[in-house]
Image: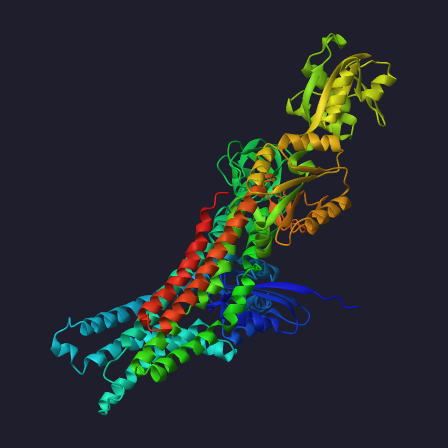
Amino acid sequence: MAVTITNRLTLPITGMTCANCSAAIERNLSGLPAVDRAVVNLANERATVEYQAEALSWSEIVAKIENVGYGVATAQAEMPITGMSDDNDARTLQKTLEELPGVTIAAVSLGIERATVDYIPTMVRQSDLRRAAKTAGFEAVVVNGDFHYAERTARQKEVTKQRQLLFVGLIFAVPTFVISMASDFGLLPTSISTATWLPWVLGLLATPVQFYVGWHYYVGGYKSLRNASANMDVLVAMGSSVAYGYSVAVLVGSVFGWHGLGTDVYFETAAIIIALTRIGKYFEASAKGRASDAIKKLLGLQARTASAIRDGLEQDIGLDDLVSGDVIVVRPGEKIPVDGVVIEGKTTVDESMLTGEPLAVEKSTGDAVVGATMNRQGSFKFEVTKVGSETTLAQIIRLVEAAQSSKAPIQALADRVSAVFVPVVIALAMLTFVGWYWLGESGLIRAMVNMVSVLVIACPCALGLATPTAVMVGAGRGAENGILFRSGEALERAAGVKTMALDKTGTITLGRPTVTEIGLVPNGSDNLSETELLRLVASAERGSEHPLGEAIVAAATARDLDLSDPAGFNSISGMGIRAEVDGYTVLAGNRLMMGAEGLALDGLDAVVTGMRADGRSTVVVSVDGQLAGVMVVSDEVRSGSAAALSELRRLGLETVMLTGDNQAAAEAIAQEVGVDRVVADLVPADKVVAILELQGASSPTEGVAMVGDGINDAPALAQADVGMAIGSGTDIAVETADVTLISGDLRGAVRAISLSRETMRTIRQNLFWAFFYNIVLIPVAAFGGLDPMLAAGAMAFSSIFVVGNSLRLRSFQG
């Protein structure tokens, strides 16, 4: 049976102005036979397409978008080439570059030894171009930035073009408006205001605005209608054209002495409608750019080069040239270029970009370091383990972009309204004209003016931007706080969580046993000190693989104790270990072992029993046949767990601990940190059942979240309405989780709930404004309460308000 290969393609789209545009592209892409899923996001202007690679090519998808009437943003790379000797080499390189997915045009010139490549920046990186050239036998030097830089450059060109059109529009529209108003209010000399040439001057000033600055609206409206839909461009083009066309008709009639339409012209109305709309679109585009600031900040964290040791020499290497196994030198104050493992030296590293936590983390040999974090104090060397798209930073950016491009379920209502919005507005505009002209008998001019007001006051853009802009900013702000939402749907569902289930080990606790107490027996064996007792037991446990033994060795290592090699090591199953260390006979184990050796615990027995009830483990130690002491080993509670659970209660959430530990141990931890309920003695499958029971006890609108480690808790995370995985700092792509908490701290769950609620509050505010604005002002315009120019200004402000309101999420502090 043939295997179906599904590709995922992300394309930067140009030319979209409102939700109808994104809906038209989405509908047409979904109609392609080999497309499984297509999502188009108006806010970040990207299309994400999942398709069957054997039945459809990326170029066909691009062609479909262009056929619908929109564009795909491309960037251009100018690459000096070395190694070409003749035309055959140039043709070979050109063919190699043209065959790369995402390359639209490639031209190679032998004379100037340069390759010029137009490419889609979300599909191919400039480093890919250079590698392709190297594979073909040539060397290429890419002189500008990465694919995010290239896409931003392409977007910036679009914003620059809008700014130029706005500038031209204002140069002509403002004088048109000023002259017209001055004439209407008698501020001009009578000889000028009544001159027959004045309307011609207004027409000459308005024409460049109508057909140069406003040409985009005609093109966009035509494309929209060609695709059996109607967007904002149709409304602006119709509204301004009616005013402009009427005025032209008045002028032409005056030439022939016919004044059936009167003598008043409305060129200033047409010009101001387009100019104000262009102002709104320019500020909207600028604000949407700020909505993606989180990605820009993450990209700005990257180092540009790395000090690598090659052939025994330290040399600066570009990140694209690094490979796994390279040894990198990092000095104080430098950024760590890529992910790796420390092989020499000690330091502290600021990982706040990754975790959101301000405290620096100590690193020494064997510890993992993450690219883009900042080295603070010491110099060290590390071995590269991940480069390029596999680094932690690249994964974070990829997840944030995926979340920003996805749709939240709440957007469905706005999409349904937007689909019929423009046709309904056009119908209302026609009814307005009919009502005023025939029923109201107010004359052609009044009917026309009110109709134009209805056309230009309507704003489908605010509806289309209400949800995606808030999701963009919310997901980006989450990443800055160490919270990765997998999708807009996850962000929305998290806002409705009322019950928080938590794993104990590795979530509430650190997940690794540590020695928390060492108790000495008075007058015990040779009156050993605490440090010497720890050294002897750790030396004896060096050969042990038991978690308790490893915890004791780790405690000794942390104190920099010199451990000896044990002799005669013997592990007694279910009891403990015996070994000879520096002439001492050391036994470390449980009460059964001591009983078998004939050693009475005396008063220690009650202490050991009490500690076990508290969820702590004990290792009883004898040296040379005499009881020497007790070591308490426990899985320490994370420092922020109690505070996090207190905050969850403040947010109105019930907390439930799901754990495989015994009831007594679980209850002890629950009491310490403040968990509401405990369900103990569970295997992973039992946790799924527990989640189902919690969901059954909740109303449909009250979700259940599960916080776990993403590995043992994967089934429960998948079953929960919102699965939150505690990340390890580098393992962030937990497939079963809707949310990843990179910091590995429960306080991240609090921030995730708070941020999702704030994002949903913002979305509801945006939708309320978008619906309220249209529901109230369209009737006001229809009943003659708005001048067309004021209507155009209100329409421009509507979109700016929605985007600006979403941008407030950037200040979220949690």
Q: Quadrant of the N terminus?
A: bottom right
- At x 58%, y 39%, the residue is 649
Nearer to the camera, 107 or 57: 57
Question: Residue at the location (52% across, 40% down)?
Answer: 352
Indicate left or right for 236 with 520 as reference: left
Q: Is residue 23 above or below residue 320?
A: below
In the rendered image, residue 49, in percent from the top left (x then y), is placed at: 60, 65
Residue 655: quarter of image: top right
Q: How far from the left and from the top, in percent, is residue 66?
A: 52, 74
Residue 531 appears in the rendering: yes
Up the image or down, 590 lies above or below 104; here it is above
Q: Is residue 106 visible?
A: no
Give the image location of residue 99, x and y in percent.
60, 68
Is 106 left, or right, of 186 in this rendering? right
- Nearest the eye: 759 or 531: 759
The quarter holding residue 176 reads bottom left
Q: Is residue 769 above or below residue 30?
A: above
Residue 512 falls in image quadrant: top right
Q: 167 and 412: which one is in front?
A: 412
- Left or right, 341 with reference to 314: right
Query: Residue at point 26% right, 78% down?
Result: 204
Residue 722 position (above or below residue 104): above
Residue 169 percent location from the top left of the image: 31, 69
